[in-house]
Image (tube, rainbow, N blue to C red):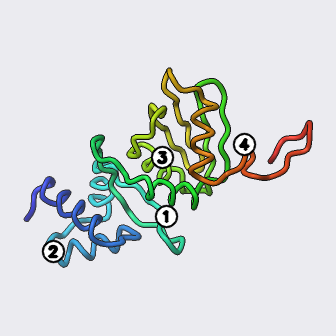
Amino acid sequence: MSTKQQRQQIISRLIAQENIANQPQLQELLREQGIEATQATISRDLEELGAIKIRVAGGDTVYAIAEYAPARIAPSDQLRRVMAEWVAEVSSSGNLVVVRTPPGCAHVVASALDRSGLVGLLGTVAGDDTILCIATEDMSGAGLAEQLRSLSGVTDATGGIPRKKGTANV
């Protein structure tokens, strides 16, 4: 019999080592470790661990647990790859920048930005397909947006999509 803490440590390790797509798969992996847990228990554990579903190459979704490591800086080439692959649009207003991604991808880009050490970026807040980036006081939103466009290859606020005067992109 394992304690809740031990079970959650094993779940964290399994999620880090395996691509776990669903709770029954995690339940089976736990069983192989000698741990019997109900689906409800696993669901609570995942919630308490802050596990989220992320999209991986090929379009599948798997569990991941965010790691709080503010000192961990992502390499700039990794940031460029993530930005080039996932950023569709960058626009700004005041000291705020909005970055658009395909559905389910915003957290990947936001995490890379947060770990980038990018000068002028105070932090990010990610939704499903939208990231709010906050520029530092000495950097305007327009300046930060230009940096992000440069990193991603997006040419303008519409992601290179021509916009007719007086109309909005939908």
Distance from disc 4 to disc 1, alpha carbons, whole Å, reads 25 Å
The amino acid type, in three-letter code, at marker 1 is Arg
Kindly check if marks 3 and 4 are in contact, taking CB atoms under 8 A apart as contact.
Answer: no
- Disc 2 secondary structure class: loop
Q: Position of residue 14 (x, y in %)?
A: 25, 68
What residue would you read off at disc 3? 110
Q: Is residue 17 left or right of residue 146?
A: left
- Disc 4 secondary structure class: loop
Dot 2 or dot 4: first in sequence order is 2
What residue would you read off at disc 1? 55
The quarter of the image holding the N terminus is bottom left
- Disc 3 secondary structure class: helix
Q: Which mark is residue 157?
A: 4
Q: Position of residue 16 (x, y in %)?
A: 28, 64
What residue would you read off at disc 2? 33
Can you tell which of label 3 and label 4 is closer to the viewer? 4
- Residue at 75%, 46% (x, y): give it: 158
Can you tell which of label 4 and label 1 is closer to the viewer? 4
The amino acid type, in three-letter code, at marker 3 is Ala
